[in-house]
Amino acid sequence: MFGDMMGMMGKLKETQQKVEDTKKRLDTVLVDENSHDLKLKVTLTANRTIKSIDIDESLLNDKEELEDYLILTLNKAIAKATQVNEAELAAVAKEGMPNIPGMDLFK
């Protein structure tokens, strides 16, 4: 019984390290998002850190329009980055979880 428990604890520790490694790797995964007309492009990491924003000159004349573009495009980029982040972390967590009946949290 204790052998199983020690094995599970070791596996959980290993999984914890894999999750931390994956979080670090996600800092290098870039997610691009463009506005519908390509006047604005943002790049984020999969950990949702903004890396760059490219703004078309025509948007610089209208503050409200630029703000709207930024809000819409950044929100889409953040949603996409979150999806990548959660999928990667869930895959690592699922891989390392012991098979406990009734604990299908990461299906």
Image (cartoon, rainbow, N blue to C red):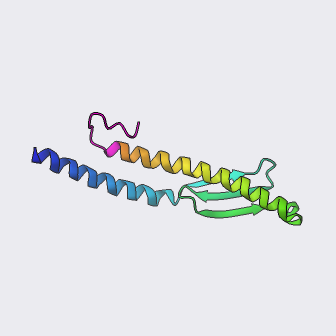
In the rendered structure, the answer to whether residue 14 lies left or right of residue 78 reads: left
In the image, residue 40 lies at what x, y percent? 77, 56
Q: Residue 1, can we see it? A: yes
Kindly indicate the quadrant of the structure image that contains residue 30.
bottom right
User: Does the magenta-highlighted stretch encompass residue 30?
Assistant: no
Taking 47 as reference, is 41 left or right?
A: right
Q: Which residues are magenta?
A: 95-107
Percent x, y for residue 61? 89, 65
**Where is residue 84 drawn, in percent x and y?**
53, 48
The outermost residue toward the top is 101
Q: In this image, 46 relative to 95: left or right?
A: right
Count every numbered label the image shows and give the total. Answer: 0
Q: Quadrant of residue 63?
A: bottom right
Q: Main secondary structure of the magenta part?
A: loop
Q: Quadrant of the C terminus?
A: top left
Q: Residue at x 65, y 52 (%)?
A: 77
Question: What is the residue that sits farthest to the front in this orientation?
Answer: 102
In which quadrant is the N terminus drawn?
A: top left
- Judged left or right of residue 25, residue 60 is right
Residue 27 location in percent, x, y? 51, 60
Q: State whether residue 32 appears in this view.
A: no
